[in-house]
Amino acid sequence: MSRKFDIKFGTETFKAWYVDKTATARLALQALKPDVLLGLDCETMALPKYHHVSQAALSPHLSSIRLIQIFDGKLSIIIDLLKCKGELLESEIRHLLETRRFIAHNAVFDLAFLKRQFRPRSIDCGCTFIAFKLLAHAARPTDDGLRAGLDAVTKGLCGVEVLKSNQASDWSVPKLTFEQIEYSALDPVCVLKIAEKMAPALEKYKLYDFYNLLKAAQHPIVEMHLNGIGFNSKEHIELVSGWREKLYAAKKILLQQTGLDDITGPKVAKWLETNLEKRILDDWPRTDNGALKTDAITFSDFGAVSPAVKPFGAFQKYKVLTSDFGGKLLQQLNEETGRLHPQYHICGTRTGRLSCSKPNLQQSPRDKDFRSQFVPSKGMVFVGADYSAIEMRVAAEVSRDPAMLKAFKDGLDLHMMLGSEIAGIDIETLPKEKCDRYRQMGKVGNFACIYGAGAKTLASQARKAMDDTSITETQTGEIRDAHRRRWAGYRAWHVKLYEKCMETLRVRTVCGKLRRLAPEFCYGAAPNTIIQGSSAGCMLQSMVLFQQMIDKGLKAKLIATIHDELIAECLPQDANEVKETLEYAMVEGFKRVFPNGCTKNLVEAKIGNNWMELK
């Protein structure tokens, strides 16, 4: 039964209106104040046939909106869509979404449901979660202890305690309790109130331009999540079976070579302590308790340090593949669509790059058999485009290093150029049989040195990349010296950046993202933030532009983004047009960040029948 009641937010009292009749819902929408920012929130419920699926209510394909809550600064309306139905009401909600300004907390979640259920042409919706993360990154040196949920942010900014016990309650019950209704009425109030608190800080830190870019990027991110990506589960089962066989073989070899009776963290750590050289143990990362780390990343990083470590690396590699990209990946296939629907997280990293989960495509194996299992819908093809050497390009643009800029203008290979500098031989006269090795050394040196890696880190990366345990810190010191000679302009910029960062303890990307740093991390994290963050800005601009072209009629769907790559899906007859458009969007995205930047050989686009064919 529809009812009106009062809700309290701290010392303030507001009116709330729960509506469960269609005619009354239309009146409630008309009662909202015009020309004001509206707080927005949704409560979702699993569709009946998917009640058996864990967390089905969080998937827009397996659930629907139960309540839509809107607050105009005075009145909070709660429309019960289980009770209020009809094409006319849907049309009026769609019109409201298309014509008013909204703000939500973690708006990507709500937008995915609203877009799928009401199909609005567009929604102008800000996000307090994004704003909060931007401000936290600008004010705090780490995310340790940071809580960004609506309840935590409301308490921190407004001093108001919000009880979230009803958040996980069953929203599919025929009759909601008053506690559920009261809870739902308060959420859009919280959103609008914390937005008001954060607005001056966004202005103070000059974050509005970057915030608006992230706000716009919500649209393509929601579309990618809704579209999902096809996956060949039958072939994957066979591949995982092969991984398990290799895991068994690697374990057998490891036990034979080490004499261990089982592979456990403590036993492996003890074996390493006994059998590794002191110089390696001194560099080996440890847990908070002082024990040697034995995770896959550590063994991957140290696999080339000593022959004794390699068997552990092989075992951990296949252990991770089978656990993270085996059955777990198949469990993430959506029951409604049969596709994977990765979630992309804005402000997921402090540099400004997106992060990804469920599954994390950004950490997926580069194995060709694995990547060939990502496929378009039946009768469709993939179109993918990748930025070429984007981080080196951004390094050249921000540092204005003359040699780097000229190399890109002339279409030269910067890794080969550094490799020849390391060898002390001109590229033209470098023996062919040594080209690959020195180019690899140049690549390691370029990426390590633009981010200020120390001798130990550079040595570790060189050993790993070149699979050569004999590389010493002295040799990698020569790589660093060669980098400073070849790219002297970059070195001068890096030194000035470090000195400035030590004074302010903050660094800003070209796109405007501000990051606070602890003094001990300024040398490496400052260039890392500017280069990776500005690269991410190029990709965000490209995603927004490409989705705008789709909205205007381009016959394609945006499917995924992996690091510096965008993937779309379309009919074969539209592939060439989509390819040209995608290339244009990515070049234009780069130019929006670097208006005078060199775009020669910037983007490479391909058409393929699976992800691997795009490489």
Image: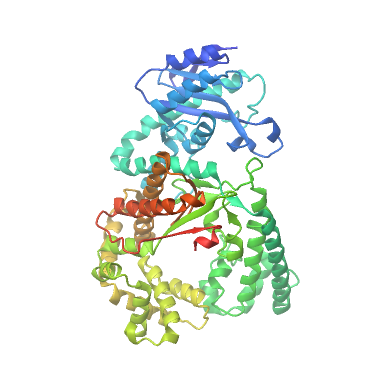
Q: The N terminus lies in which quarter of the figure?
A: top right
The residue lying at 66 percent from left, 42 percent from top is: 335
Q: Is residue 468 visible?
A: yes
Depth check: give the residue in front, 396 or 352. Answer: 396
Depth check: give the residue in front, 459 or 443. Answer: 443
Apparent side of residue 205 relative to residue 580 in the rendered image (left or right)? left
The residue lying at 46 percent from left, 28 percent from top is: 40
The quadrant where residue 366 appears: bottom right
Q: Where residue 143 sits: x, y (%)?
A: 46, 49
The quadrant where residue 43 appears: top right
Depth check: give the residue in front, 413 or 553. Answer: 553
Q: Is residue 578 above or below residue 186?
A: below
Q: Is residue 161 visible?
A: no
Which coloring applies here?
rainbow
The residue lying at 52 percent from left, 80 percent from top is: 468
Q: Where residue 95 sits: x, y (%)?
A: 44, 24
Q: Is residue 427 above or below residue 47?
A: below
